[in-house]
Amino acid sequence: MSDEDLWRVLRGIADMPYGAGQIAALEQLLRRVDAADDRHLAFVTRMQATTGYIYGGEPAKSFVTFSWCLSEFDSDPQPYHQRHLHNLLWHFKYMINGLLNFPEVPLDRTYAVLDDMERRYRAGGHSLQAVHKHRFRVADHVGDVEAAAHWYRLWQTTPRDGLSDCAGCDPTSQVGYLADTGRDVAAVELAEPVLAGRLNCNEQPQSILTALLLPYLRTGRTEEARDAHREAYRRLRGNLANLWDIADHVEFCTLTGNEARAIELVERHLDWLDRPPSPAAAMHFAAAASAALRQAGPSTVYRRAAEGRPAAEVSAASLADELAETATGLAARFDARNGTSHQSEWIASRLAVQASGEHVPLSASVRRRPARPTRPVGEEPGAPASSTERAERGRGGKGERPAVTVPADADPDDLLDLAEQSWGRHDRATFRAALVAFDDRFGSAELPARTSAHRLALRASERGDEDDIDGAITLNRAALELYREADDEVAAQTVAGRLGVLLTRSDEDTEEGLLLVREAADVLDRLGDAQQRAAGHDRVALVLLHRERWADALAALDRVPADAGGDRHLAARIALHRGHLLEQLDRVDEARAAVDEARRSGRELGVGEVVTGACLAYARLVDDPADAVAACDEALEAAPADAELPVRVTRARALLSAGRAPDAVDDFVEAVTLCVERGAEGDAFLRWELANAYRMVGRLAEAAEVAEEAVLGLDRLGAQAEADRCRHLLAGVYAGLGEIDPALALLEQLASNLDGPDNLPHRAQVLEEAGGILYDADRDAAAGERFAAAAEAYRLGDLPLDELRARRRETYAWFWADDRDAASRAVEVVDGLAAKLAGQAEPPVLYELAMAAEAGARVLTGEERLDEALGRLTGVPDRLRSIEAFGEAAQVEALIGELLLRLDRPAEAEPLLRRVLGGLPAASRQVRQTAWLLARALDLLDRPAEAAALRAEHDLDEDD
């Protein structure tokens, strides 16, 4: 590489985001620079490396590059050194902060660097304001209260200059000191004008917002505290260098009663402790994480793999102990270096942090659950009740069921019959009361085999209701044996049928399950009454439904006696099962009628489970999203507690389809909350959907936060495909927030993940999107590389039209990067691809061929090959208009007009440009450019008055 090439590489690295990637690129460049023996380039590269190490999370390496630059500056002054003197003096501040954070560096070394800093600042005639600030920081670090107060006063009273920290960073340090010394109100007041102004430092506004978390909280400004946490953490979360500040956010979550969010943050950044930016940052994060983990109870935390340690779920309590030991051990090392006990005392206070005061909701995905609706199922549904109405119902009134009274004179069989009947009527309260009465009165009595069998069968129903399928199977087998001993064939076959359904649900032995339910149905057809026959065939249908034999299951239901033997509850369930089967068979109208029948019956009978199931099925079957929402509203009012989650999810999706995304957000948040509260799997998938809903309503900050949580959860579940799709969503959200580098990092990760031959189209799409983001950010050379990589992936995937589009975009990128050689090479490739597609009449092909011609013409124009450029554009506007690409046609005609002017053919250019200008929308970006070209044509045609009028109309300067 030539020196010029190396300088170009350095400029490109300077545009990279801080982090491991930039550091790797800098270190590779340093090796080449040293081999090239260019002292100027070596100095500037190390100056850039010092900044990169500090902000990229590897500050220890900055000590070496800074020392090299300082030695070079002092030993052999060169003219170029003076151009970098300001930055070299600025870097002294980095060194003071960095040296304090490594306990192995003697304190005398830090004082020596401070003294050298002061000497150089004095020699250059600079203010000592920054020197006083950093003497304050050292005193504060070692716990010298009087010295810290002294240097703080000097810092505040010494005039600022160009070497002072920025208008955000200086107040950030002041806020921290005021908060530490109990002056929270003053801290908040100091920060207000700072936050109202413009902050364009790398560390702001996230640093000052982090410093304000506790002052906001302690002065009752909970909304400001919440917003500061969300905004600052979002900006901090992606950079290892921010580990210290992230620890402050973990602690804030713990203090505000957001234990779940605190643990999520710990889990997300835990592996950073394997490569911390400094021992001080590791100490602070370990202490904050330990305090958070102690609030987690008997739970586990996912810890990623590291060298010598596999990925695993670890006990929160044991991890808390480990991290506390890490923090206290590091604090002891600092104190040994400093000769004080300040760091150990400070860490002990951090380890003791726990929730205090009022809960402050922070998470965009989890909130404390409001009271559930309890409208009696038999009421006609109306508009969904408000949260206040639901809370009132939860405390009593219409939704409160009367206490169950069991007859005092009931014998054992009467109680079991009452329980059996109540079970069939979905009356769980009476069912349990009857069984409790049975156990209290007759639990220790010697009972007939049939009675004991009946009790076992009902215990099995209880276990099944609690999802203890294995326990239910065991009890049913025992009941079946007793019924057979008692020679009660009808009861035995009823239990056998139930056992068959349970076996199918457990996947223990589906063949045995099917055999049992069929045999039971046949026996009950001969010996049972109409209700028993109906129940037998329904059980056959359930087993076949579970095995996805939809038509066979429906045929089993067709054998059910009319009206289910007078059992309206069973009839309602059968109608619901029929609806599910018809839905699977795509017999939509019949399915809708069946579930509507179940819905009406369930409402009349007051059976919430049936109403809920029927409403959810109805919501899936209707075409109008508004009807689906209405059905979900009814389901939400009727749903038992364990059915609320699927209702919330279905309603949220229906609301999205109905164009009511803001309402969908609330339901998705409630669904995630329910998942977390119950420890149910699936919250990561719901967070993904919630993130998309936030995106749809323009709440991009919340969308980013929730999508990050979803990616972490999906990775933890091993759901890579879904995690990658969520990453894709997150990249778009980042781009929408203007967070270009995090968006690009995600797209790079996606491209790496999608490295298989089956994923080539998706890999290409991701690379092309990355190119588009870079192009829009005017990082054109990097954009050209991404477009080229995308084109190659499209080629390997045999997608020639997409390949052409990517190569065309690559051409534009190299053109605007002013790399004319690369642009010319790209045009040659584009021409070859276009030749292969020529003659095809599909609109997408015509569009790409036309735009490829325009891209080539722009490159030729830049090379002053104007006639060739003009020839390329012959007929292109008409082809674009033929496919209704009117904007692009106008763009090409404006370029033709420019070429005609540059070829000294203004008489041809003037009418063309006038027509283009007249057809452009007033707000179009092309208006000013086209008006300028037209005015220039009028000048060349010696029509100055018209040209002046046109410039005045469009506010153009003649010299533009």
Image (cartoon, rainbow, N blue to C red):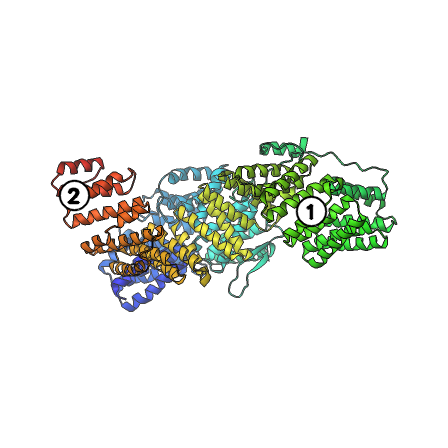
Task: Find numbered disc 2 in the image and state the secondary structure of the residue it sits on.
Answer: helix
Residue 116 shows in the view? no
The residues tagged by marks 1 and 2 sit, at their Cα atoms, a distance apart of 84 Å
Q: Count all numbered tags in the image, as a single digit.
A: 2
| Residue 741 image position (x, y, % from top left) | 39, 52
Nearer the camera: disc 1 or disc 2: 1
Quarter that holds the N terminus: bottom left
For the residue carrying disc 2, how many other residues have a C-alpha within 10 Å: few (<14), some (14-19), or many (20+)? many
Q: Which residue is mark 1?
A: 558
- Nearest the viewer among 647 and 110 is 647
Question: Which residue type does callout 1 highlight?
Answer: Asp
| Residue 946 image position (x, y, % from top left) | 16, 36
- Nearest the viewer among 297 and 758 is 758
Quarter that holds the C terminus: top left
Residue 164 shows in the view? yes
Q: Which residue is mark 2?
A: 937
Residue at 81 percent across and 50 percent down: it is: 490
Quarter location, residue 406: top right
| Residue 936 image position (x, y, % from top left) | 17, 43
| Residue 613 image position (x, y, % from top left) | 63, 42
- Against 559, residue 948 (above or below) is above
Quarter location, residue 95: bottom left
Q: Is residue 658 left or right of residue 575?
A: left
Question: Which residue type does callout 2 highlight?
Answer: Ala
For the residue carrying disc 1, how many other residues have a C-alpha within 10 Å: few (<14), some (14-19), or many (20+)? some
Task: Find numbered disc 1 in the image and state the secondary structure of the residue it sits on.
Answer: loop
Residue at 13 percent across and 43 percent down: it is: 940
Q: Is residue 595 left or right of residue 705?
A: right
Q: Is residue 892 left or right of residue 623?
A: left
| Numbered label attached to residue 570 | none
